[in-house]
Image (cartoon, rainbow, N blue to C red):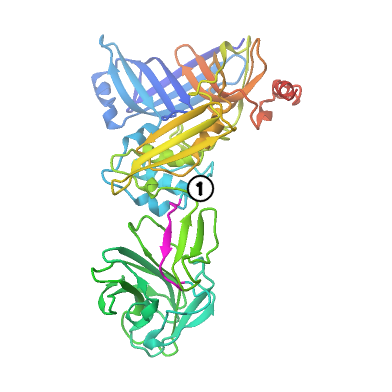
Amino acid sequence: MTTAKHTYTVTGAGHVLGLREGDITFDVGRAPHIESTLRIAMPTADILAALDPRLTRRVLIAAASTFSTIPAQTRTFDLGLRTRRVAQDGRTVTLTLASDEALLDDYAPLSDDTGAFAHQSSLRAVINYVLGKALGAALETSPAHDEDVTVLTDATNLSPNGGFRSTTAGWVGGASAALVRTAGGPPGAGVDFFGRAAMGGLNGGGVFNIGGESAGSTAVTVGAGRQYRTTLWVRSSAAVTVSLNIEWVTAAGAGVGATTGTPVSLTANVWKRVEVVGIAPATATRAGTYCYRTAGTWPAGATFDAAAHRFSEVDNVLDDLPFLFFDGDTTDTVQYGYGWSGVASASAATRKALISRSPDMLRWQAGRSALDFLRPIVQAYGYRLVCDEHRKWTLRDENYNPGGALNLRQGVNLRDVEDTLTRDSDTWFDAAVTIYTWKDSDGVEHTEVDSFAAVDPPTQVRVFERPGVPYPGPGFSAYAVRRAQGRGRMLSAETGIDWRAQPEQFLSARVDGAPILAGTIQALGYDLKTGDMSITTRTADIPPSAWVLIPAGETWLDSPVGESWKEEII
């Protein structure tokens, strides 16, 4: 039988504290991931004053253990101080500590924060944006999981020939010159053709237009008081400064003002996207898009190119980032389907979202904690955001493996074991329904339902209510069902402290009166006074990488895991 000796050094607010007793617990299904309660001897008045959780204090726990039969072990924990309670007798102080998910739950913006929209092509970038604002922290590079969390919205491109697929209809160059349709286009813009106009010798003036006074029947129809955004890729053979503008026109063809974009400097022969956002005046019914050289005469022989024009109504400029070009011939994806509202390259193009994902998902509402903002987004993709005892943040999927394995044997290193089977819906279920209810930026209430079943018909359905949470798209229900499948069998046990143990680590156990059990650690607790370690498994099923559980010198079929596998397949 192995004997052990454990020593602890506890430091709080820069002072060494006298530990009396305490515990440290981990739980895969909890945020904060780590919690601790310590009872310390009453310190001096100045140290007690320094142990004020309102000052965001840290407490460091350093553990060192020696064993009679195995090498010595050490482990450290850097946790945040959450509460301090002084005993009535004035002789002890109780401290409660937590990993930094607790700090993430403390932080919330004072007004709606839309900064995440700029990072929506990457889940990691969204997380790092929030971690940076709240804590000045960032994800570790490994595991390197990432997802595209771009908000998906229906949209219409009112530009009838923005891609020059077959003609240059509706477009003219300076001095009413015809454009020449040319193969090619800006990299990544989603087009294969562009229009080119000869500009040499022209004095500033109009460069391109679509609609407006000069285009008559090809005009883009607009609604008074509505907001529109237009973008255009442009390239000049000479270095010039240009401005993209919207000209508003009445039903009678009279101009009623223009919205002028910010001047943009072009490098010779380099494509650049220009844009402008404007609100249609009260009498406007049509609009034209123009790109001008802001001043000066074009050099002799100069050419000006345009491609990938988009003109869309937008309620909020954040609702459709990064505002990419599309038309009816854009190739369908798993996210979007595209089509023409009428004749190809002569009508508006439509884009339909094939996956429901609310734009409000990335609107970080005032007063909503950073943790509550990130959690539904992360969970919809089957991940968990975890901070460990060294303040390192990781994005973990359901197959996360911290390495190593724990082998428990009754009568050797296992005591007080309990093996439980249950179909309680809080623990085990084969179907889930998640109900999201929230209000958008206009105060309109929405409801979306995400459901998933592992079998048809399901036998145990778990319902998750998500009030005040914008719909992040489908995924959480499926993730919850997958994780629940192995939880019908739970092993709770006590053994001696092993500082190498980690939540989600593989575990095998020999228990009297039960088959060989294998699974992963759901919860882990260290009792610093008794030297005991408590364990609860998340599953008793054979994990995909269970070969790591085989003790050195044993073959697969001779190992406890192999024996259990043979029993299962029989």
Check residue 161 for magenta coloring.
yes
Q: Quadrant of the N terminus?
A: top right
Secondary structure mainly formed by the magenta segment:
loop
* Residue 493: image location, x then y, percent: 55, 15
Q: Residue 441: in sight, yes or no?
A: yes
The residue positioned 47% from the left and 50% from the top of the image is 122
**Residue 481, percent from left and from top:** 54, 32
Give the residue drawn at x 69%, y 29%: 547
The residue lying toward the viewer, choosing from 67 and 294, is 294
Q: Residues within 10 Å of mark 1 (few under 14, many from 20)?
A: few
Callout 1 secondary element: loop
User: Residue 172: which quarter of the image?
Assistant: bottom left
* Left or right: 568, with 36 as reference point: right
Q: Is residue 369 above or below residue 550?
A: below
Q: Vertically, is 116 above or below 337?
A: above
Residue name at image x 29 percent, y 18 percent = 85
Residue indicated by mark 1 = 147
Residue 222, given in percent of the width and then of the height, sits at: 33, 68
Which is more toward the observer, 48 or 84? Answer: 84
Quarter of the figure with residue 316: bottom left
Q: Say if the magenta span includes residue 285.
A: no
Q: For this rendering, which residue is in front, 30 or 457?
A: 457
Boundaries of the magenta span: 150-162
Q: Can residue 245 be seen in this snapshot?
A: no
Residue 211 horizontal side relative to residue 110, left or right = right
Q: List x then y, in percent, for residue 523.
A: 50, 23
Amino acid at circle 1: Glu
